[in-house]
Image (cartoon, grey):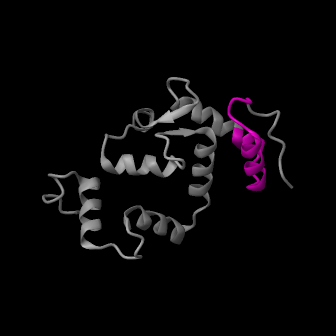
Amino acid sequence: MGCNLSNSVGNEYLNGDSIATFSKLRISPASVEKLRKIFNKIDADGSGEIDYNEFIHHFGFKRSRFTKRAFSVMDEDGSGEVDFTEFVLCVWNYCTFNKPALMRFAFELYDEDGSGLIDADELLLMLKELYGKSKYKKNTKA
């Protein structure tokens, strides 16, 4: 089936690899265009990349280790910024997860050593990141 993206979205966002990847994933030109508009809203400085500050500001998040970790999942190449291709692929991945895959994704955020288990240190890190270093001890949910 595929799709023709070369004429549908501004060239500043796409290269040949991006176009081929989006086509293989069957992401329609209309969807790419919608994602480009969202990306532009988040990219407040118009640099063509979303940095951590733009990410937390757009979504109204507080600066925390958890939000930093969530941002780093989107930042596939570890550059400290998310380009349009990384953004589209992250949205596509998230939207195609079923419930077990989403649970696995959340689990893998904290299974730092890849052991397949969340040990006490990893659990403590998760609680601190979710509830705050000093607040997690007093939080009944934690």
Taking the image as shown, residue 76 lies to the left or right of residue 141, namely right
Instruction: State the extent of the magenta-drawn residues as a range.
Output: 10-32
Q: Nearer the viewer, residue 111 or 55?
A: 111
Residue at coordinates 51% horizontally, 35% vertically from top-left? 50
Q: Position of residue 11 (x, y in %)?
A: 74, 30
Determine which quarter of the picture holds residue 40: top right
Whether 71 is drawn above or below 95: the answer is above
Q: Is residue 123 above or below residue 50?
A: below
User: Which residue is found at the position 38% from the left and 37% from the top?
Assistant: 60
Please provide percent x and percent y for residue 5.
Answer: 80, 40
- Name the residue rendered at 77%, 55% in the picture: 24
Numbered circles on residues, count: 0
Whether residue 1 is situated above or below residue 78 in the rendered picture: below
Horizontal and vertical percent position of residue 120: 24, 72
Would residue 51 appear left or right of 39 to someone viewing this image? left
Let me know if residue 87 is in the magenta part. no
Would residue 118 be found to the left or right of residue 91 on screen?
A: left
- Is 57 on the left or on the right of 99, as rendered? left
